[in-house]
Image (cartoon, rainbow, N blue to C red):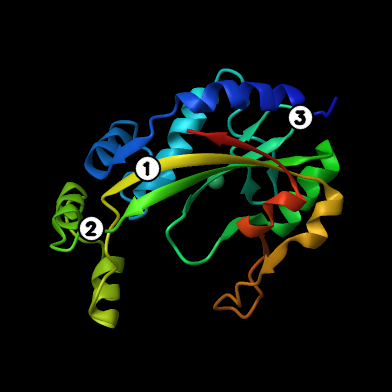
């Protein structure tokens, strides 16, 4: 039996209990009450992470192993990280984690898991009422937001609602790493290259060990 079999059994029984329809305001308020990344523009990604961790805190270790500055979200027999991905976007690549940390995680436990929540998101905040509401809740615009608006004149439309449609549990072992794309992130202001990350193309799912949870 695979080392991750027990982890998988828990994930497959617990994760279908996640709420499926996420209203932006409700979720931000829930995150605020828990003091968990509630100021973030991409609230739906943090909401997925928050709820998954909350549901698994008794059966998994939260957080998981740390490798240098990278800490994975959860651990039981192997490390797991949580990602949310908007499926309406035209690209199907999911940014995973730091390349070196994932390699060390696989060396230590044999496998490394990713919990990927696929979300159908709505960008319908045309009159920006959700955005205004969120800005007011935060006590006004941050210096960063003010600077960005000056620079670009427009700010991105916010997602007001998300629907969790499927969860993919992806398990990677050493032999899989060659098949992943690598995201190079350029250089820091001091000229040092930023650490590379692995990326996963959802179109290639059938080449990997994965389990889908339909919701
Ligand atoms: Ca994560």
Where is residue 57 shown, x and y percent of the image?
Answer: 54, 23
The local secondary structure at tag 3 comes to loop
Residue indicated by mark 1 = 163
The answer to which of marks 1 and 2 sits earlier in the sequence is 2
- Determine contact: label 3, label 2, CB under 8 Å: no
Q: Local crowd at mark 1 within 10 Å, few (<14), some, or many (≥20)? A: some
User: Residue at horizontal 79%, vertical 52%?
Assistant: 103
Q: Is residue 200 left or right of residue 162?
A: right
Q: Is residue 62 left or right of residue 44?
A: right
- Most foreground residue, 152 or 128: 128
The answer to which of marks 3 and 2 sits earlier in the sequence is 3
CA separation, marks 3 and 2?
40 Å
CA separation, marks 1 and 3?
28 Å
Q: Quadrant of residue 8?
A: top right
Where is residue 70 shown, x and y percent of the image?
Answer: 64, 49
Residue indicated by mark 3 = 4
Q: Local crowd at mark 2 within 10 Å, few (<14), some, or many (≥20)? A: some
User: Residue at horizontal 25%, vertical 61%?
Assistant: 142
Q: Local crowd at mark 3 within 10 Å, few (<14), some, or many (≥20)? A: some
In what quadrant of the picture does the N terminus appear? top right
User: Residue at horizontal 44%, vertical 35%?
Assistant: 50
Q: Is residue 215 left or right of residue 191?
A: left
Marking on residue 74 = none
Of marks 1 and 3, the one in the foreground: 1
């Amino acid at each position: 039996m695979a080392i991750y079999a027990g982890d998988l059994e828990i994930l497959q029984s617990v994760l279908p209990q996640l709420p499926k329809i996420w209203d932006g305001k409700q979720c931000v308020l829930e995150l605020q009450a828990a003091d968990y990344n509630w100021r973030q523009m991409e609230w739906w990604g943090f909401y997925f992470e928050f709820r998954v961790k909350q549901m698994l805190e008794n059966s998994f270790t939260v957080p998981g192993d740390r490798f240098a500055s990278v800490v994975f979200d959860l651990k039981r027999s192997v490390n797991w990280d949580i990602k949310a991905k908007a499926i309406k976007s035209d690209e199907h690549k999911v940014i995973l984690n730091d390349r070196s940390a994932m390699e060390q995680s696989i060396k230590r436990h044999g496998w490394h898991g990713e919990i990927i929540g696929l979300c159908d998101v709505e960008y319908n905040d045309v009159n920006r009422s959700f955005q205004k509401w969120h800005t007011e809740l935060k006590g006004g615009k941050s210096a960063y937001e003010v600077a960005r608006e000056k620079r670009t004149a427009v700010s991105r439309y916010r997602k007001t609602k998300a629907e969790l449609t499927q969860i993919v549990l992806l398990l990677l072992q050493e032999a899989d790493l060659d098949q992943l794309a690598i995201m190079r992130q350029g250089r820091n202001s001091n000229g040092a290259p930023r650490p590379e990350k692995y990326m996963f193309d959802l179109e290639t799912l059938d080449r990997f060990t994965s389990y889908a949870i339909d919701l």
